[in-house]
Amino acid sequence: MTRIGLGALALGLAVAAIAHPAAARAKDSYYITPSQVDLDNLLAPPAALGSAEETADLNAVQKAEMDRNAQASIDAEEDHDRSVFRFADVMGSGFTPQKLPMTDAFFERLLTDEKRIVAEAKAHFARPRPFEVDTNLSPLVFPKKTPSYPSGHTAFAYVTAIVLAAMVPEKATPIFNRAATYGYNRVVAGAHFPTDIEAGRIAGTVIASVFFHDPRFLSDFDRSRQEVRTALGLPPLPDREH
């Protein structure tokens, strides 16, 4: 089965996770728990060490390093920050922490849940980082000693993009384009392989789908959406059904 096929399978299988929410939330979870998003079985395994696929993956990281210029390096380093406000360049001038305190806290909760879910998948797949495979690489950032697959930053970017696009559908296209750039900057930074990014996109999409079936999430989403639309000078939208 192709990776694209497995991505579609992941989205289909997410229904099972949604239909059987955890009876009790894990200690450090806010909306959803890792048991509701079984990425170990939803994602294709990463390329095996020494395989042709891994060689192509590594070549892409090496090329991204050779091609990066000063501005690309700055962008990649700045996108190491996991914050919803990295999307301010497409959201508009009113999209600031000062104007959006509720939204700031809301996305921090999403990040906390997403990181716990992805951490379990990283531990399961245990893929080395590109700079651990090729010690001649010069990464711009040095992530904590966590495995490479899937990309947690990319999962965060797509959770964020899906939620923001639901808040401000008028900006959906630039929001998703920004998520794609954010993910690719992990390759430019030398922190991830391209297939880590693809897996992160799938993971973020599945995680966001499960979020949107949680009543507590939906209640906070409605309040945050109103805050965002007010800050951006946009008319209100009706609440989603809980």
Image (cartoon, rainbow, N blue to C red):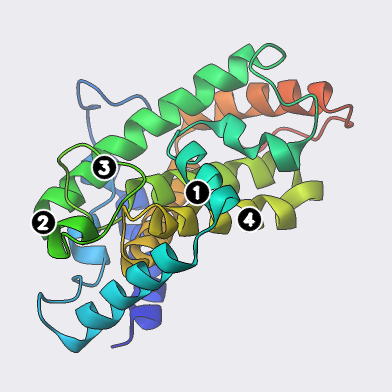
How far, Cα to Cα, is label 2 from label 4?
Answer: 28 Å
Residue 82 shown left or right of residue 135 in the figure: right
Q: Residue at x 39, y 60 (%)?
A: 187
Please state which of residues 145 and 123 is positioned toward the viewer in this rendering.
145
Badge 1 element: helix
Please state which of residues 116 and 127 is positioned toward the viewer in this rendering.
127
Say which residue label 2 marks: 126
| Foreground disc of the pair 3, 4 | 4
Q: Which mark is residue 156?
A: none
How far, Cα to Cα, is label 3 from label 2?
Answer: 15 Å
Say which residue label 3 marks: 117
Q: Indicate which disc, 3 or 4, sits on the residue closer to the N terminus.
A: 3
Say which residue label 1 marks: 73
Q: In the picture, residue 144 is in which quadrant?
A: top left
Specify the amino acid type for callout 4.
Answer: Phe
| Foreground disc of the pair 1, 4 | 1
Specify the amino acid type for callout 2.
Answer: Ala
Q: Indicate which disc, 2 or 1, sits on the residue closer to the N terminus.
A: 1
Q: Residues within 10 Å of mark 1 (few under 14, many from 20)?
A: some
Q: Residues within 10 Å of mark 4 (few under 14, many from 20)?
A: many
Say which residue label 4 marks: 176
Q: Residue at x 43, y 43 (%)?
A: 156
Badge 2 element: loop
What is the x, y in percent for residue 68? 50, 60
Q: Indicate which disc, 3 or 2, sits on the residue closer to the N terminus.
A: 3
Specify the amino acid type for callout 1.
Answer: Ser
What is the x, y in percent for residue 130? 23, 61
Q: Residues within 10 Å of mark 2 (few under 14, many from 20)?
A: some
Q: Residue at x 42, y 39 (%)?
A: 80
Q: Indicate which disc, 2 or 4, sits on the residue closer to the N terminus.
A: 2
Q: Residue at x 34, y 79 (%)?
A: 3
